[in-house]
Image (cartoon, rainbow, N blue to C red):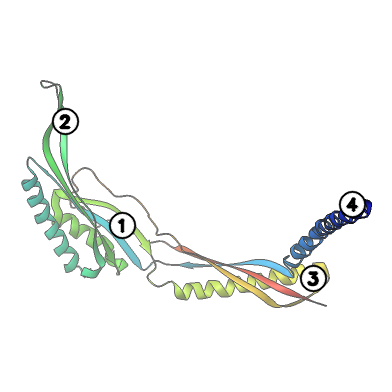
Amino acid sequence: MKKKWLWAIGLALVLPIIGLYGCSVASPTTIEAVNLGGQQEGIWVTGQGKVTAVPDIATLRLGIEAQEATVSEAQTQAAEAMDEVMTALIDNEVAEKDIQTQYFSIRQVRRWSETRDQEIVVGYRVTNMVTAKIRDIDKVGSIIDAVAVAGGDLTRIDNISFSIDDPSAYFEEARQKAMADAEAKAELLARLAGVSLGKPTYISEGIQIPPPIYPRAVYEEVPIPAPALPPISPGEMEISLTLQVAYAILD
């Protein structure tokens, strides 16, 4: 009787092991089927469209820098000069909403004293920088000249950049070119592969926003005189757009 019980217990232990082994063999087959089902199908191409545009916005970064023996003197001098600069901008049809403060600081000016054998404070420097968006490109040179005269020796001009106010029309043209480029590539691949090209089954767009154009840095640490109108050229900028498109393959 004991032998029969022992045989029954042993059989009960073996059956779960066989079941577990069967599961472990079936798992790789299931995983492989999932991976195969996730593979891309059809003809995948990337089309690119580029459009050249002339900037219609100039952004000028400018300001005032004053240094005096006391904070009060430096701040008063800087404020008076900045008022003149702001007036010059507005008088030249730069809208107040297009003028924005970018940087303001009051710093100690130090130098090394040989007699004291340490740094000493010799004054205070006040810096006030703004950006001005100029919507009439033809007036950039005259505005720079007016600002230099208004701020006098305290004028600081950091840089100028160019951009496009509303690039949507250019993106539409670039999009059409990108789609035509993608279709041409797909048709070529289908012809080389000896298959017929179907309709698009997937489209993904990537827009490349052109960075502002910085033609030159015009920041000066020394006082800026009032020269003749500076020559300013906005040049051209490139707007680029890419499309990833998947086409079905017809039987």
Amino acid at pointer 3 = Arg
Q: Kindly report the distance in space between the C-alpha atoms of the residues bearing marks 1 and 4.
A: 104 Å
Residue depicted at x 71% and y 73%: 247
| Residue identifier under label 3 | 191
Tell me what residue is drawn at x 88 percent, y 52 percent. 10
Q: Earlier in the sequence, mark 1 or mark 3?
A: 3
Which residue is identified by label 2? 111
Query: In the rendered image, which quarter is residue 190 located in?
Result: bottom right
Q: In the image, what residue type sits under mark 1? A: Pro
Point out which mark residue 6 bears.
4
Q: Which residue is mark 1?
A: 231
In this orientation, does residue 233 appear? no
Q: Secondary structure at mark 2?
A: strand
Location of residue 48 by image quarter: bottom right
In three-dimensional space, the C-alpha distance between marks 2 and 1, rounded to whole angstroms, equals 39 Å
User: Residue 60, how many percent across, how many down?
Assistant: 28, 59
Q: Tag 4 or tag 3, which sits nearer the N-term?
A: 4
Q: CA distance from mark 1 to mark 3?
A: 54 Å
- Location of residue 87 with respect to 1 vertically, above or below: below
Amino acid type, label 4 = Leu
